[in-house]
Image: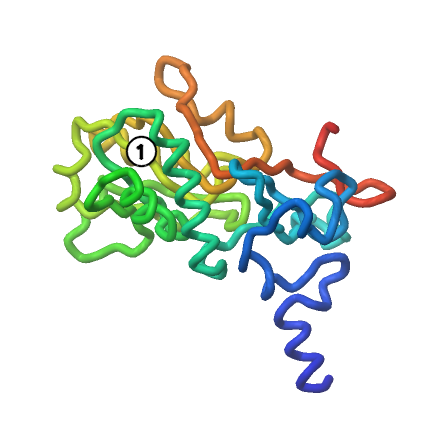
Amino acid sequence: MSEIASVADLCGQNLPGFDATTDYWQATVTEAELTQSPLPPYARSYPARLPDGRYLLLPLRGMPTADGSAPDRCVASLIANQASMEVVEELALHMAQAAGAHDFDAVIGLPTLGLAFAPLVAKHLGHSRYVPLGYSRKYWYRDELCEPVSSITTPGKGKLLYIDPNQLGLIAGKRVLVVDDAVSSGATMVSGLKLLERCGAHVAAIAVAMRQGTQWQQKLVRADASAIPVVAAYDCPRMERRADGWWPEGL
């Protein structure tokens, strides 16, 4: 195998039916500038419509199958720390504008990619700081202030979500806005909510760049079964393969 072919394999260009993501997430475009229809079926990417009418083109990623066969389900992908700073700033502004309708005292950032948005959202909303959660345990952290985590993109166990105990005074007894890059299955967010509840915080709302599908809706509820408001810069469906391409599930 040549060196060039090896690089192509490593960057994902040889994955059947899916693009390498190198050139994605670098700019938003108008509908006239789109290189594909905003309507299904989709081939390799999904055009997410933002509140200002512009679009962000997202690469489609196949969901792993148990037997290693070609995927029949896929999702649109956003990797914030590979996006241009301009795109991250645009998305954070939309998130902040939507979150501004809710009342809260502090902004919480979920790792890893939620930390790309949390400081920007906090700044747009007039906050001078935010409270980051993390996966790295410092020696002064307390075992009771952690929560196991899994997600649609990082399944399995073994990862723990922590808060620095020195930050507890900023959120205990306070209403908080929780910021992450995306919500899909809701598993990561549920772990964050459990940890914040243990810290004495009340979650007023959640702000994400991407709301993906609807699986999260049944999970993100309070003890009284009321829904926690979830605002986003854009929505995108989970996809299923059909003869002519990828379609939103159930459409």
Packing grade of label 1 (10 A; few <14, some 14-19, many >=20) is many
Element carrying mark 1:
strand
Quadrant of the image occupied by residue 188: top left
Rendering coords of residue 46 (x, y %): 66, 46
Above or below: residue 98 compared with residue 56? above
Residue placed furthest toward the front: 32
On-image quarter of the N terminus: bottom right
Task: List the residue tagged with mark 1.
Answer: 177
Q: Is 7 positioned to the left or the right of 134 in the image?
A: right
Which residue: 67% across, 86% down? 3
Rendering coords of residue 34 (x, y %): 68, 50
Which residue: 38% across, 48% down? 117
Q: Is 47 positioned to the left or the right of 83 in the image?
A: right
| Number of marks in the rendered image | 1
Residue placed furthest toward the right: 243
Which residue: 58% across, 48% down? 56
The colouring scheme, among rainbow, by chain, secondary structure or one colour, is: rainbow
Residue placed furthest toward the top: 224
Rendering coords of residue 99 (x, y %): 37, 31
Q: Looking at the picture, which amino acid does disc 1 mark?
A: Leu
Whether residue 184 is visible here, answered yes or no, is no
Which residue: 39% across, 50% down? 159
Q: Is 2 positioned to the left or the right of 144 in the image?
A: right
State the residue in front, 159 or 29.
Answer: 29
Whether residue 201 is visible here, answered yes or no, is yes
On-image quarter of the C terminus: top right
Rendering coords of residue 221 (x, y %): 41, 22
State the residue in front, 97 or 187.
Answer: 97
